[in-house]
Image: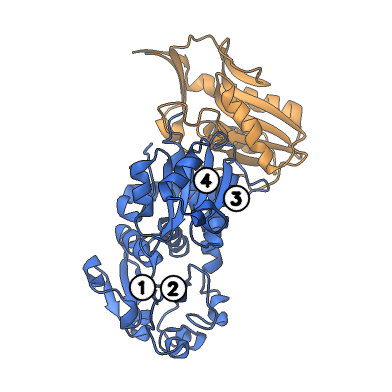
Amino acid sequence: MSQKVLLNAKEVNIILHRLACQLIENHNDFTNTVLIGLQPRGKYLADRLAVILKTDYKIKNLQLGHLDITFFRDDFRRGEKILEANTTDIDFLVENKNIVFIDDVLYTGRSIRAALTAIQSFGRPNEIELLTLIDRRFSRHLPIQPNYRGRQVDAINEEKVKVNWVENEGEDSVYLINN
Amino acid sequence: MSELSVNHLLGIKYLNKKDIQLIFETADHFKEVINRPIKKVPSLRDITIANLFFENSTRTKLSFELAEKRLSADVINFSASQSSVKKGETLIDTVNNILSMKVDMVVMRHPNPGAGVFLSQHIDASIINAGDGAHEHPTQALLDCYSIRERLGEIKGKHVVIVGDILHSRVALSNIYALQLLGAKVMVCGPKTLLPKYIEDLGVKVETDLRKALNWCDVANMLRVQNERMDMSYFPSTREYTKLYGVNKSLLNSLDKEITIMHPGPINRGVEITSEVADSNQAIILDQVENGVAIRMAVIYLLASKIKH
């Protein structure tokens, strides 16, 4: 197994600030916008962006939720792996809101498809956008593209992109792992 | 991620502690789902479930059906009173006929103890026991324990008394197994005639004085007197039963501490508990019903994930 550093802590930090600024450019003061981190790994990115928007850019009343898509996935009973559910934490309705889905890596697009269905349980949003830290090009199974991307990566299918956060792995970094 | 150690839910007897914890954790997620504006998830859209009720039921049947529909499964219902069972068809024939319509899972209530185990040895589908005679009612025990956990934080070390008709109760046996597995101390309380012989061999305390039992416990699970299963008279009169084993507000107020009251339903108001108690804040009877749907969704989801595609 070999691994290559795609982004180090400093680069991750610069990208997070750029993504925060791009969000502000489109959503101003976020009065009608909600950020939804996709469980399990998009949660960390969403939480981090929310902190930056609140502290560095003084956005007040930012609404943030976490959405679990386990029960909406299209691979139930189709793999060896048992699907493990995570907590959904959305204590508001998304009716007529602008939603930004936040996930760490965009790969096949199937998780996003599941999230698009799952979010309907909380109302009919006005518009949904997608923000991902890493966009793996040429690997999509569905016609889904991000509106905001941190870094575009060309990786072959055998390779894995791993995003680490201080909160769980002790450092901010992105690795390309070759098994 | 762990999975259930069993392919069927035939009784709590066949589960281990990890299974129950996994069911509870999964039920936590489903409880959040059923409190959303849209309460449905598409996980089981390619699964068909048959609800076979060879015995009457309101709550359990509705609860299972709702759980199945909230998971997007296709559901067919069968009740013995309106079927060919009356014409003399055997259980295996009935079920095999239903399975040839490509059913993946069977939820069955049957008057004979062991009906679920018997069926699991003869057919391919995954089976959930929704009550077999006076033997087991596993989903009821799971939802009871889940409700205790929700109310009191944990089950380990808690004192739970099961009051009433233990002899004819499947809820009692499943509850005893489940509570002991989760580390609770269990007592049964009722008239001697309604306590099975050798019940203490299960490791439960036995008490015939209701006041003593209530003073000992944190939770009292009040069972219904099952008149329909009684082939003889087990106590002189309903009035006397109520006097000795019925719970009313003044009895609860005279205890040293506030205890939680549970009832698996249907309630005989004024017999085992008064309306005042059933509708009080101490009772979690309607929470039990709500949790029943979440628990059944969890059990169905976890068993379905083991069915090969």
Mark closest to the chain's N terminus, 3 or 1: 3
Which chain does the residue under circle 2 lie in? Answer: B
The residue at which mark 1 appears reads as: B166
Mark closest to the chain's N terminus, 2 or 4: 4
Q: Picture coordinates of residue B100 (x, y %)?
A: 49, 36
Residue type, label 3: Ile
Residue type, label 4: Ala
Say which chain is blue: B
* Relative to B60, A170 lies left or right: left
Q: Are marks 3 and 1 in contact (CB under 8 Å)?
A: no
Question: From what the image shows, is residue B307 above or below residue B8?
Answer: above
Q: Residue at x 31, y 76 (%)?
A: B195
Disc 4 versus disc 3: nearer the observer: 4
Q: Are the residues flagged by discs 3 and 1 from a single subunit?
A: yes
Mark 3–mark 2 Cα distance, whole angstroms, equals 27 Å
Q: Are marks 1 and 2 in contact (CB under 8 Å)?
A: yes
Disc 3 versus disc 2: nearer the observer: 2
The residue at which mark 3 appears reads as: B34
- Residue B223, numbered label: 2
Residue type, label 2: Leu
Mark closest to the chain's N terminus, 1 or 4: 4
Disc 1 versus disc 4: nearer the observer: 4
Rendered image quadrant of residue B217: bottom left
SS at circle 2: loop
